[in-house]
Image (spheres, helix red, strand yellow):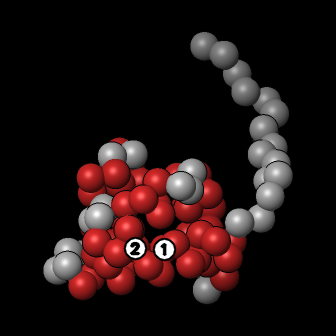
Amino acid sequence: MEQYNETLKISNPSDNSQKVKEVMTVVYSALKEKGYNPINQLVAYLMSGDPTYITGYNNARILISRLERDEILEELAKEYLKTL
């Protein structure tokens, strides 16, 4: 079994925080308006990468597909950890 003695450092080449926030606001609203549970749908999308978990209403699916899932997760983690 390999041992990992060093922590890998991930660099963030660009800050897309505002773009991610804007897209997530549109996607959340679209899911809610169409009667879906936005949290469940977003988690399923983030876990699977399957865009069909996101409604096409208000171009939500197209918008979220333009973002990398790791960008979304990074922004969600930053926002959550601000509350601690």
**Viewport quadrant of the N terminus:** top right
Farthest-out residue, top: 1
From the top left corner, tell me how far across and down residue 83 is, in percent.
61, 86
Q: Residue at x 39, y 45 (%)?
A: 49
From the top left corner, tell me how far across and down residue 18 is, in percent.
67, 76
Residue type at tag 1: Met
From the top left corner, tell me how far across and down residue 24 is, in percent.
48, 74
How packed is label 2: few (under 14 Cα within 10 Å), some, or many (20 or more)? many
Are the two marked residues, 1 and 2, in contact with CB atoms closer than 8 angstroms?
yes
Give the SS element for disc 1. helix
Question: Which numbered circle lies on residue 70?
Answer: none
The residue where tag 2 is placed is 27
Viewer-proximal residue, 82 or 64? 64
Left or right: where 62 falls relative to 31? right
How packed is label 1: few (under 14 Cα within 10 Å), some, or many (20 or more)? many
Question: Which numbered circle lies on residue 24?
Answer: 1
Give the SS element for disc 2. helix
